[in-house]
Amino acid sequence: MGTYVPLIQKFVAKAFLHHTAIAEQLGLNASDLKALQLLGGESLSPRELGEKIGLTGAAVTALIDRLEQAGYAARERDNQDRRRVTVHAAPEKLREIERLYAPQRRRMSRLLAQYSDEEFRTVADFLTQATKMLGDDDRV
């Protein structure tokens, strides 16, 4: 079992470098790109976005400011309650991000097609459980 941990660490490191390279192509940092991906097509309050990505209020405000200045996101005031603000990603920018990830997605699809349904369920279960574990880990 112990030999798998270095493989996972190497995969995570390579994935981080890939995401960082894409972020740089977009003129963003890796954290801003991840925030956009977590935001996706949703509209969230700054507080909700901060909770999703684990940032304090001040840090999420700075992040939203950067994304807004770069044209990747926008704040929107609620028509009923002008104090309520939501943030949404610019759809055209999300399409640009998806376009940059398309080659990786195609390669990943070809790789996953090599596994049987049962093997894929095992891979999917591992990824689901590992993602949940990382989300629950507050020792970072």
Image: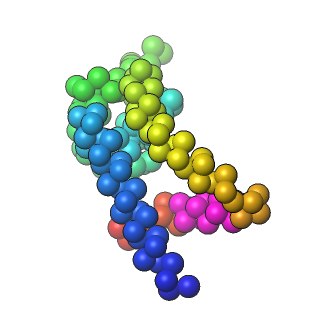
Residue at the top extreme, as displayed: 79
Q: Residue at x 61, y 66 (%)?
A: 126
Q: Residue 134: x percent and y percent?
A: 48, 64
Q: Main secondary structure of the magenta part?
A: helix
Q: Residue 54: x percent and y percent?
A: 38, 53
Residue 63 sits above or below residue 2 on the image: above
Q: Name the foreground residue: 62 vs 101.
A: 101
Residue 17 sits above or below residue 97 on the image: below
Query: Magenta part of the protein: which range?
Result: 120-132
Q: Residue 47: x percent and y percent?
A: 39, 41
Visible in this render: residue 60?
A: no
Q: Residue at x 27, y 36 (%)?
A: 25
**Magenta region includes residue 128:** yes
Left or right, residue 95 beside residue 130: left
For the C terminus, the quadrant is bottom left
Q: Name the foreground residue: 42 vs 124.
A: 124
Q: Name the foreground residue: 37 vs 24.
A: 24
**Magenta region includes residue 23:** no
For the N terminus, the quadrant is bottom right
Quadrant in the rendering for residue 97: top left
Q: How is the protein colored in the picture?
A: rainbow
